[in-house]
Image (tube, rainbow, N blue to C red):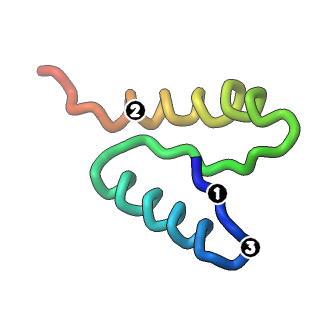
């Protein structure tokens, strides 16, 4: 959890974390804690990341 006063760089820091995580191969969800967050994660983000994960696996031959 990241908290702080307005204008102190929280979003900039989170965006940097997102960039580093993606570069390291992590699957990243970038979201805002607004109503229906869990629904968006479970019905939009997780299915998309699952497909991305499956498609990025090396094929077994």
Identity of the residue furthest to the left in this view: 61
Secondary structure beneath dot 2 equals helix
Residue at the outermost right position: 35
Residue 3 - label: 1
Q: Which residue is mark 2?
A: 53
Q: Residues within 10 Å of mark 2 (few under 14, many from 20)?
A: few
Residue situated furthest bottom in the rendering = 7
Residue identified by numbered label 3: 6
47 vs 36, nearest the viewer? 36
Q: Residue 60, relative to residue 20: is it above or below?
A: above
Figure quadrant of residue 17: bottom left
Question: How crowded is the residue under tag 1: few (<14 C-alpha within 10 Å), some, or many (20+)?
Answer: few
Vertical comparison of 36 with 19: above or below: above
* Local SS, label 3: loop
Give the image location of residue 50, x and y in percent: 49, 28
Few, some or many residues within 10 Å of mark 3 (<14, 14–19, 20+): few
Q: Pointer 1 and pointer 2: residues touching (CB < 8 Å)?
A: no
Nearer to us in this view, 26 or 57: 26
Residue at x 57%, y 35% (from the top left corner): 48
Residue drawn at (35%, 60%) of the image: 20
Task: Tell me the CA gap for discs 1 and 2.
Answer: 31 Å
- In the figure, is residue 12 to the left or right of 53? right
x, y percent for residue 41: 67, 32
């Amino acid at each position: 959890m990241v908290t702080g006063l307005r204008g102190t760089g929280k979003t900039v820091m989170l965006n940097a974390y997102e960039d580093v995580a993606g570069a390291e191969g992590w699957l990243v969800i970038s979201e805002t804690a607004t109503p229906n967050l869990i629904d968006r994660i479970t019905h939009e983000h997780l299915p998309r990341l699952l497909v991305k994960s499956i498609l990025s696996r090396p094929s077994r031959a």
